Amino acid sequence: MRISPFAALRPQPELAARVAAVPYDVVNTEEARRLAEGNPLSFLHVSRSEIDLPPDTDPYSAPVYQRALENLRNLERQALLRESSASTYVYRQETTLLGKAVRQTSLVCCGHVDEYASGIIKRHEKTRRDKEDDRTRHTLTLKTNTGPVFLMYRDRPSIDALIERELSQAPLYDFVAVDGVRHQVWRCAAARPYVEEFARVEASYIADGHHRAASAGRAGIELRASNPKHDGSEEYNWFLCALFPASQLTILPYHRVLKDLNGVTPASLIEIGRASCR
């Protein structure tokens, strides 16, 4: 698969813990508002900018996307650094799940929208059009990917060795978030070895971020169509991703409870579920 380094827009190290925020789609508006309360640097002011507008604001209305852009520009002035050159990054998460210490380490880079379209970046969920529309508009308004797509790949010892060398250096960031997860980031000494090694990876798989990936793909297509000088070298051909080796991922159960089958029998419900996965 193709990957690319990128010139990051990232927090000043001393402010990273204040800027860091949960993914936009794991909280509703009120939860996001509570999490960002009293912290003007929280990235939720960018990813869920409706929290800064009146409570009855339609989260998909034009003022929300404009406010997101304004908030991003304000955050740039107050707390962010823009790299002058492209790099890849190593990102590690550490936490405790079900009484067990868990650590997973990824390469943060860019994946190509054509490889999402062709299936080299593989998906396993259907996406909702309204959610795609939201993040596509968000991306096009900000001209920025505001969150990575979580990808996994089959382990390669050669990539593990590259990452291990990065970990011997001092990290750019090292902090524990309010949920107890430790986050560490290292800037890679060189990107080309990773580009060459991932060119030998046949496929990656979306573990989380199907709507982010679909929206990045749609944004890329729209920007290509509006650019008469498109030649394939543009940044909009790429989207932010974090690539984790499969052996490091911990898969937790995700349970839902149905209180009413709405007249459908349990056997029919199971068959409907099977049919939707075919």
Image (tube, rainbow, N blue to C red):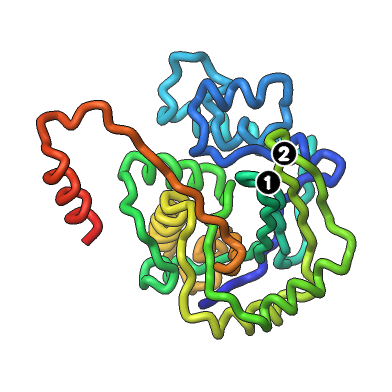
**Which quadrant holds the C terminus?**
bottom left
Q: Which residue is mark 1?
A: 96
Q: Residues within 10 Å of mark 1 (few under 14, many from 20)?
A: few
- When the figure is inspected, residue 4 is found, relative to residue 180, above or below; the finding is below
The residue under the point 33% across, 33% down is 257
Residue 7 image label: none
Q: Secondary structure at mark 1?
A: strand
Q: Amino acid at mark 1?
A: Thr
Callout 2 amino acid: Gly
Looking at the picture, tell me which residue is in the foreground, 161 or 130: 161
Residue extending furthest toward the front: 99
The x and y percentages for residue 127 are 33, 49
Which of the numbered marks, if any, corresponds to residue 180? 2
- The answer to whether 137 is drawn above or below residue 56 in the figure is below
Q: Secondary structure at mark 2?
A: loop
* 129 with respect to 201 (left or right): left
Q: Residue at x 31, y 44 (%)?
A: 129
Instruction: Please say if the residues under marks 2 and 1 sit with CB atoms less than 8 Å apart.
Output: yes
Q: How many numbered marks have been drawn onto this rendered protein structure?
A: 2
Q: Of label 2 and label 1, which has the lower sequence position?
A: 1
Residue 276: give x, y in percent of width and height.
21, 53
